[in-house]
Amino acid sequence: MQRLYRARPDVETILDQLPDRLPGLSRLTRLRRVEIDYGRALACLSEIASALSWTGNQIPDIHEIKSHLDVFQPAEDRTRPVSNSGDPVKDYKAAVLAGHLSLITAIAAAGATLGKAYNLGRTLADTCRPNQDDANLQKGFEPHRLAQLRQDLNDLATVLPAHSAKAVARSLTWWRDAVYMADDSPTGQDRRSMLGSVRTDAPELRRRQGLLNPKISKASSSISKDSLLLALPRQGELWRVVLTGEKKPLDLLTPDDYLEAARRAVAGGRLIATRTILAAPKTTISLFLLLTAVLAGVLAVVEHTHTSGGGKLAAFLIAVGGYFGSLARAAMPRLKSAARAVEQPLWQTALDYVSAEGISVPPVGLPDASGWSRLSVASPAAPPRALSTPGADDSDSGSGGKDAAGGDAGDVTNGPTAQGSSRSGSRGHLSPRLPQIPYVSLSAYTALVTLITRRAGPRESMPSARTCGGTFR
């Protein structure tokens, strides 16, 4: 609904001549794109109604949106020749608003979790919309707004696909760090100061191992706001496909990522073991000191005996072996039980972390090792123009205007641009140079369908550029 609300359809006209080639998704007119979004909304609403066993009178009616879209059809195809107020775009947006209010009321009444998922989708769709300026970016990353997003992700982690909510929450944290550090305005400085001594571990901002990561409140960023604005819509698309189950986070991982997850899990285990020993009760520490004192006494006796050197060595080895054997017999059962208790949580937490790295796109995430992000720099400067009348691309920054790449912000794909663009095919992207599915912003509907219909069984995940060596055209 957020995407529908920000769209600004134009009157459809009949082409003077047929195109040489069939148009792709990126060359559809605004009206066609809005109709795609409307059709997907109807399909997802139908799935929700079926899963919740809604009767006909319980299903929110959003067909008024379609009737207001008919005003933009060619004159001979219109079923609604004039608008009510004389402003067809205003009437269309009013219909979308009415549909949104009926939807959020019905969905929230069906369950608190569903209402929260709808609101999560709406907020992320607005945060990651294309064609934003600096003021929009500041507003989208307001502290209370991000805190609510993270809280909703944590609340929905149980019902969303495995690793998706935790990975998106951490990726969102990294984007917060990058946006705040790149914002040198007074507002940005105030937000950085709110974080105090918090240090960022965003992939492109962290320092090499052994050095402390930079403090958000003091360090300057090597990432520009322009590059963040260009990459944000693509990042929102990745968050969407992960949260809705269209893409499993683990499918974006490489063997090196699994090795990194194992390293993090082992490091976490060492940390827990150290803290466990330091937190041991006084009786355990007293027993350890007693056994150590006994060992020292035995070694002192062995040292002062008049036996040969070989006998002393044998006695020394027996004493030390007995000491460590006693410690092992006393501690091993507890260590094994503790290891079994934390093994899976440590491994799952490590997978959450590397999954967040896998879904974070440059310039916040790391570029892919296969070089697709470098090849994308050589992409054409601007995508082909849509099949529309002159002036059809002129609009404000709401949703139908041109983005910084020269393409329509309401387009179903994020067309490649000059250097610093969305880097199709790079780390965290679905496939090299493929037009993405026609739903750039995160959809509240698809998130709801995932929550409601998960009992239907897992969905097969598509291969990605990071897990497939070939190039698909």
Image (spheres, rainbow, N blue to C red):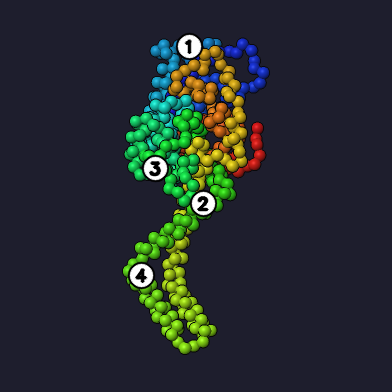
For the residues labelled 3 and 2, the Cα–Cα distance comes to 25 Å
User: Mark 2 or mark 4, which is nearer the start of the sequence?
Assistant: 2
Residue under the image location 48 percent in, 38 percent down? 364
Quadrant in which the C terminus appears: top right
Quadrant in which the N terminus appears: top left
User: Mark 1 or mark 3, which is nearer the start of the sequence?
Assistant: 1
Closer to the camera: disc 3 or disc 2?
A: 3
Identify the secondary structure beneath mark 3: loop
Residue under the image location 44 percent in, 17 percent down? 89
For the residues labelled 1 and 2, the Cα–Cα distance comes to 60 Å
Amino acid of disc 2: Ala
Closer to the camera: disc 3 or disc 1?
A: 3
Amino acid of disc 1: Pro
Asked whether 340 or 112 is in front, the reply is 340
- Identify whether 78 is placed above or below 122: above
User: Mark 2 or mark 3, which is nearer the start of the sequence?
Assistant: 3
User: Mark 2 or mark 1, which is nearer the start of the sequence?
Assistant: 1
Closer to the camera: disc 4 or disc 2?
A: 4
Q: Which mark is residue 446?
A: none
Pointer 1 local density, CA inside 10 Å: few below 14, some 14–19, many at least 20: some
Give the image location of residue 87, x and y in percent: 42, 13
Amino acid of disc 4: Ile
Residue identifier under label 1? 81
Q: Which mark is residue 261?
A: 2
Identify the secondary structure beneath mark 4: helix
Residue under the image location 59 percent in, 35 percent down? 374
Identify the secondary structure beneath mark 1: loop
Residue identifier under label 3? 215
For the residues labelled 4 and 2, the Cα–Cα distance comes to 33 Å
For the residues labelled 3 and 1, the Cα–Cα distance comes to 59 Å
Q: Which mark is residue 285?
A: 4
Amino acid of disc 3: Lys
